[in-house]
Each structure stands twice: as structure tokens, then as C-alpha cells.
Amino acid sequence: MTRLIVLALSVTFAQQAAFAAPVTAMGSTALALAAVVTLHSPLVRAYDKRVIARLFGGQTNFGFTPNRTISVTADKATCKTSNVDITQRSCELTFHVGKRALTGREANEFSATALAAGATSEGAAGSIIESISKVACTIDPNEIMKKAGGGAECTFEIGQ
């Protein structure tokens, strides 16, 4: 009986350790995640938001300061979609200086992008929930403009 309890506890701790493992997204997926975080972030300068939006929109024919990158961060993002009331979807993004609530299309866009980047979803009492934390993206516009697949990298942890 003691072995069974110890085994169950060790499996639980192993699952929790794996659950918080960092995920790295690179290339187009990282640019997409950075773009949807940037859109709602109070921490990213307006100029940098425009640069990321242009890059994500496929526009690469503009100059950008050499040897400069754009950092995009979020403390946490939690998205919920109801599988009972299919009209309900929401996300809450937490930044160092505050929170931003998303609903409808914006929430769906964020949720789908996070899933594409490697987030996982869980079901709970009529809801599907995705949660990521410690989001940190680095965007190098000059590298992206080379069109060789580089210049965007994001890391995050699955769960809170």
C-alpha cells in the first residue's frame, strides 16, 4: 500500500514537472504568437507594435535599426471556450502592469495561435481551457526581412 501511494505521488510530481516545462516556438509560429500578444500589450511601444504588425502582414520592404530586437512579454494568458454555450470564448492576458480581457474573435485568435505555438488544452465542466505563462518573445526584424526562416523566437510555460 505504501509503495502504491509513493508511486502515485511520484507520478503526480512528474506530471507537474512536465506540465511546467518550457516550450520554444520559432519562425512563423513565434512571429504569430508575438503579434497577438503585442496587439494587446501595454508594454510594447507603439512603433514596435506597428513593425510587428507589418512583418506579420508580410510587409518587409522597410528599414529597421540594425542590431536591435523587439521584446514581447506576458506574465500569463488563460483562455476558456465553452463546449456547451458555443458562443462563449474569452481570454485574460496578464502583463506586469495590468490585465487585458479578450472575448469573441480576439479571444479565438489568441487561443488558436497559442495552441499552434505549442500550448495544450484541457477540458473542465463544459469548458476547454488553455493556459500559458512566462511568455517571452524576441523579434529581430532585420533577420525576418532576410526571409530565411529566422528572426522570431518565443518561449513560454504551459499552465500557470
Image (cartoon, rainbow, N blue to C red):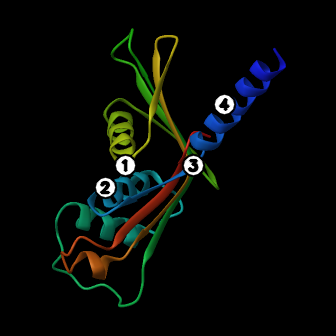
Which residue is the site of mark 1?
117
Residue at position x 71%, y 24% in the image: 8
Measure how far apart labels 4 and 3 are at the Cα level: 15 Å
The label on residue 54 is none
For the residue carrying disc 2, how many other residues have a C-alpha within 10 Å: few (<14), some (14-19), or many (20+)? many
Q: Position of residue 40 (x, y in %)?
A: 44, 51
Q: Position of residue 43 (x, y in %)?
A: 54, 62
Question: Which three-letter amino acid code belongs to the residue tagged 4?
Answer: Val
Question: Which three-letter amino acid code belongs to the residue tagged 3?
Answer: Ala
Mark 3: secondary structure: loop
Depth check, mark 3 against mark 2: the one in front is 3
Residue at position x 38%, y 10% in the image: 85
Which residue is the site of mark 4?
11
Which residue is the site of mark 3?
21
Residue 149 versus residue 19: which sits nearer the camera? 19
Tell whether label 1 touches label 2 (CB within 8 Å).
Answer: yes
Measure how far apart labels 1 and 3 are at the Cα level: 14 Å
For the residue carrying disc 1, how many other residues have a C-alpha within 10 Å: few (<14), some (14-19), or many (20+)? many
Depth check, mark 1 against mark 3: the one in front is 3
Q: Position of residue 72 (x, y in %)?
A: 48, 63
Measure how far apart labels 3 and 2 are at the Cα level: 19 Å
Which residue is the site of mark 2?
29
Question: Which three-letter amino acid code belongs to the residue tagged 1?
Answer: Ala
Measure how far apart labels 2 and 4 are at the Cα level: 32 Å
Query: Which image quadrant is residue 143 in?
Result: bottom left
